Image (cartoon, rainbow, N blue to C red):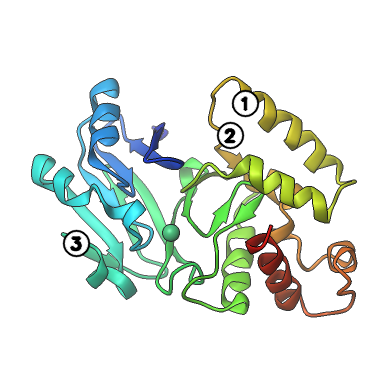
Amino acid sequence: MAAETHLFVCLQDNFGVLVHDKASGATAAIDAPEAAPVEAALNQTGWKLSDILVTHHHGDHTGGIAQLKQHHRCRVVAPRNEAQRIPAVDETVREGDVVKVGGLSARVLETPGHTAGHIAYWFEADSLAFVGDTLFSIGCGRVIEGTPEMMWQSLLKLRKLPGDTRLYCGHEYTQSNIRFAQTIEPDNLALIARAAEAAEQTAKHKPTIPTTMDAEKAANPFLRADLPEVAAAIGMAGKPAAQVFGELRERKNNF
Ligand SMILES: [Zn+2]
């Protein structure tokens, strides 16, 4: 049976999301920015929290873990390389590990760059991926603990996911990301269409995610750093993709 999801807002612009396996009743929270919105989402859905799957150690992804664990006795799964910076961890995972949520299965993908141990959870059978702060809709996370080369490799790893994979990211940054992307590729038709779609979603107070990998490959400049037209657009024709990516990220930091 397919996974069900429930998306909601936490803090200012963080996303919380629940993944539910109807057959077993298991429910995972992907990250836990704060406890109260997760509790509200559980009340609204009637689901019972069995697991918290953590993408990385930042406080706006982990602030609710201790309180939720105390209340629900749920299992906390976290990336091995930064588990010591995450509260109440029960199980650590690394590249290639499989995490079960009831009858659902997620494969762990290590995507370092934003943080050194950042991971994503790919529910292949459900065409779902939770990419934390590595990839955003039309953007990507800041390279805080890694190098541009490392982050570019992480994005390439995610880019290999099937095109119809629905992507859930950690923040609602789509509108700002689109404004930046349009400075790089103003004539990109997929980006123009995405801008209209996101404006409509935002006007209706709806989230702009999930997005899909196909949609991101068509319009997200950070996944397109190896295309000649993107390199040329920033005066870096012929330069290595990781360098082009690094320059794009630098420009976004100052945007
Ligand atoms: Zn973060």
Q: Would you name the residue on which mark 1 appears?
A: 201
Query: Under tag 3, what secondary structure?
Result: loop
Q: Front-most of 197 and 155?
A: 197
Residue 89 disc label? 3
Q: Is residue 232 left or right of residue 12?
A: right
Residue in the image at 29% along x and 23% along y = 45
Is 81 on the left-hand or right-hand side of 25? right
Q: Determine whether the beta carbon of the residue marked 1 sits less than 8 angstroms from the nearest atom of ligand 1.
A: no
| Numbered disc 1: secondary structure | helix
Whole-Å distance between the Cαs marked 1 and 2? 6 Å
Gap in angstroms between the C-alphas marked 3 and 1:
36 Å
Mark 3 or mark 1: name the one nearer the start of the chain.
3
Amino acid found under the numbered disc labelled 1: Gln
Residue in the image at 55% along x and 64% along y? 142
Please name the amino acid that badge 3 sits on. Val
How crowded pointer 1 is (Cα within 10 Å; few <14, some 14-19, many 20+) is rated as: some
Quadrant housing residue 12: top left
Q: Nearer the viewer, mark 3 or mark 1?
A: 1
User: What is the count of numbered marks?
Assistant: 3
x, y percent for residue 227? 83, 65
Ranked by sequence position, the earlier of labels 3 and 2 is 3
**To which residue does mark 2 refer?**
208
Report the disc number at residue 136: none
Label pair 1/2, CB-CB below 8 angstroms: yes
On the image, the x and y values in percent for residue 90 come to: 17, 61
The residue positioned 68% from the left and 29% from the top of the image is 199
Q: Position of residue 189 (x, y in %)?
A: 86, 41
